[in-house]
């Protein structure tokens, strides 16, 4: 099986780049990585991988990307942190073309297994409005009330996967990722997520001798954050499994944004005055992964502690900043 062609759509992105790197380490010899970005904007790129720059919103490009493929990992999407998705709903929705055309190409070429990376943004808003955490079970995606724009695209694309399985017998697997973070991902420019953004702010404050940090919202928003290694392990386990329904891949370690800042301040050995920007994008009040289903079906749950993952993330971002390395815009 390791000689069969595996395609990673979004291979130049954060999770996609790590996934390609992991496949190489596992000994897979035929990997095709596809991304819309110029090669110098890819987070990770490998000379022994077939790297293609293609806009996968185009049907013909999806067919070119998937020809001869045995397995497909679709991680391609126009997305970012809350600051991006709240202000770019149409761009996020257009990603529905990527999954639709990839599914059509997968059916055309007889792909054996197809993975789709969905998001916790599919979950009903009414479950996420209280300070009291509601751990989000897979069933909580319905009745549908997803995050406007990005969440609806993800939910619709999940349904597309389901119906391609039902109607065309395409073997599909769907993971609902919960706030994946780690090294070699976006940390500046407007698309970064909270863990990277907080690392950047604290590093720059420390280097500049600034004693303040701006926090979006009141800092009491609750989240679970999933380290990239856990994300990859869960993705590969799901892809090999017989789990046909969407499933959470996310840590159940709940923290407030204030607590996340505490963790990074401890790593940086600094304490800053917090300035709360109540007008900034801040997302839902609470969002947490409920892991009963993944424990029962895969006999595993994410286990990497937030403090450990953030230490590695902080160290990598610190190195980027002090060495004046540019952050790709995607």
Image (spheres, helix red, strand yellow):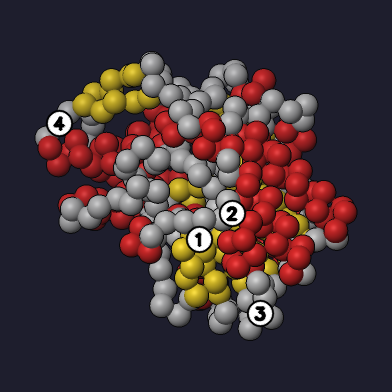
Position of the N terminus by quadrant: bottom right
Say which label, 2 or 3, has the lower sequence index: 3
Quadrant in the rendering for residue 201: top left
Say which label, 4 or 2, has the lower sequence index: 2
Which mark, by number, is residue 4? Answer: 3
> Where does label 2 land, which residue?
58
Which mark, by number, is residue 54? Answer: 1
Q: Looking at the image, is 31 positioned above or below residue 130?
A: below
> Where does label 4 land, which residue?
210
Q: How far apart are labels 4 and 2 at the CA level?
A: 46 Å
Q: Residues within 10 Å of mark 3 (few under 14, many from 20)?
A: some
Closer to viewer: mark 2 or mark 3: 2
Q: How far apart are labels 1 and 4 at the CA level?
A: 42 Å
- On the image, the x and y values in percent for residue 298 come to 73, 57
Q: How far apart are labels 3 and 1 at the CA level?
A: 21 Å
Q: Label 3 near label 2: C-beta < 8 Å?
A: no
Q: Which sits in the foreground, 172 or 194?
A: 172
Identify the residue shown where x is 69% and y is 38%.
Answer: 155
* Residue at disc 1, secondary structure: loop
């Amino acid at each position: 099986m390791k000689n069969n062609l595996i395609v990673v759509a979004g291979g130049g992105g954060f999770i996609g780049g790590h996934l390609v790197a992991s496949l190489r380490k596992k000994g897979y010899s035929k990997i095709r990585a596809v991304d819309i970005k110029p090669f110098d904007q890819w987070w990770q790129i490998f000379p022994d991988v077939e790297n293609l720059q293609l806009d996968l919103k185009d049907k013909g490009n999806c067919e070119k990307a998937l020809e001869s493929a045995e397995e497909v990992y679709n991680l391609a999407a126009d997305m970012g942190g809350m600051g991006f998705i709240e202000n770019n709903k149409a761009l996020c929705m257009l990603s529905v073309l990527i999954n639709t055309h990839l599914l059509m190409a997968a059916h055309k070429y007889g792909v054996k297994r197809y993975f789709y990376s969905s998001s916790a943004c599919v979950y009903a808003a009414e479950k996420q409005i209280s300070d009291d955490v509601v751990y989000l079970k897979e069933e909580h995606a319905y009745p549908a009330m997803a995050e406007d724009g990005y969440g609806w695209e993800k939910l619709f694309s999940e349904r597309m996967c389901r119906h391609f399985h039902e109607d065309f017998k395409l073997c599909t697997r769907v993971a609902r990722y919960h706030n994946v973070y780690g090294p070699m991902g976006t940390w500046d420019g407007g698309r970064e997520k909270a863990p990277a953004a907080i690392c950047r702010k604290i590093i720059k404050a420390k280097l500049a001798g600034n004693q303040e940090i701006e926090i979006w919202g009141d800092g009491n928003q609750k989240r679970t954050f999933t380290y990239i290694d856990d994300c990859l392990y869960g993705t590969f386990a799901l892809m090999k499994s017989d789990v046909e329904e969407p499933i959470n891949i996310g840590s159940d370690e709940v923290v407030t944004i204030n607590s996340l800042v505490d963790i990074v301040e401890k790593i940086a050995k600094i304490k800053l005055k917090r300035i709360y920007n109540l007008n900034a994008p801040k997302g839902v009040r609470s969002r947490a992964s409920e892991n009963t289903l993944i424990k029962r079906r895969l006999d595993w749950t994410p286990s990497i502690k937030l403090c450990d993952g953030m230490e590695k993330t902080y160290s990598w971002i610190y190195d980027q900043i002090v060495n004046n390395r540019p952050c790709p815009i995607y």
